[in-house]
Image (cartoon, rainbow, N blue to C red):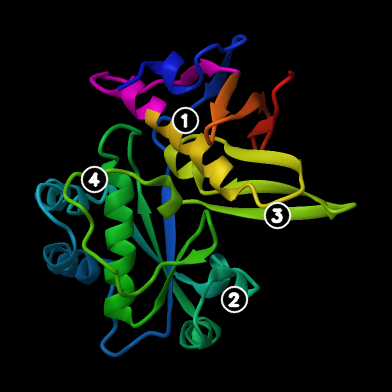
Amino acid sequence: MLGLGGLLGQHPKGPIRIPVVAAPAIPFGVYYTPLYPPLGPDELRARLGGWLDQHVEEPLRGALKPVVASAELLSYLDLHKTALPPPTDAAQTGATAEEAAKLERAWQVMAVTGHPAVRVPVFGLWAALAGAHSAAQELDGVAIDSTTHRVLRADLESPIAGDGRLQLAEHVTVCPLANSAGAATWRTLGMQKFGLPNLQLRGALGDPTLLLVEIGQRLLDALLRANHGREEPLAELEVGSELTVRGATAVHLQYLAGADPLLDVSPAAG
């Protein structure tokens, strides 16, 4: 495995420091119409173990069971739908016609939130995902990732691997925000689940999804590696400001502070 310098480019022009949220909340909303008798947070937590048995491989399954049993690490909160409204455009969520109809009918939302520290294997993320999937199944509802605004598929194509390896493409989305003379600003959604800022690329003429996901994966790998074995997770991740992605594309990274911090991606100077 490469060190941080090799991971993020062989010849960085200078380091940048990216503030990291050490214990980000990972929120999902399960939108549903209440059944009778109603299922509350305690009942949903009690039934989660069965979902883990069916859909998560060992050793991750066994490691998650004490996590999901803890109200401090995985929380459920039953709310009226207006307290955590779903995305207004159901088509953008990737919802099927049946899921869109359920979202329209729903008037309650079960907020399922993981509270992790960002370190391998990110138990909080897997606990929150499992909790949202299980709650959607028990409540006959629709689970949405509140950071990416995407529906979680009800039927997993395959079990969650026991090594807990994170493939960023499964946990973020990339979308265009605006167009100007044919050039779009593209931004990731979902990096905040890992305590990192979302990535932004301005002036893209094509679809930069693969490029932004690769950059995000490298940053996440660097953060997880840097936190490995530490008692307290990093408050800042230091990386080179330039890297080469997709074989030959050189890009420059700049941290943009603010209420919604971003990591700006631009072509590196020649």
Q: Name the residue under label 3.
A: 176
Q: Which amino acid does label 2 sit on?
A: Ala
Q: Which amino acid does label 4 sit on?
A: Gly
Q: Name the residue under label 2.
A: 90
Q: Which of marks 2 and 1 is nearer the N terminus?
A: 2
Q: Which residue is drawn at 49% across and 51% down?
A: 172
Q: Name the residue under label 1.
A: 219
Q: Which residue is drawn at 40% across and 27% down?
A: 223
Disc 3 element? strand
| Residue in front for this viewpoint, 117 or 166 | 166
> What is the x, y in percent for residue 165?
27, 43
Q: Earlier in the sequence, mark 3 or mark 1?
A: 3
Proximity of marks 3 and 1: CB atoms separated by less than 8 Å: no
Residue 46 seen by the camera: yes
Q: Name the residue under label 4.
A: 164
Q: Which of marks 4 and 3 is nearer the N terminus?
A: 4
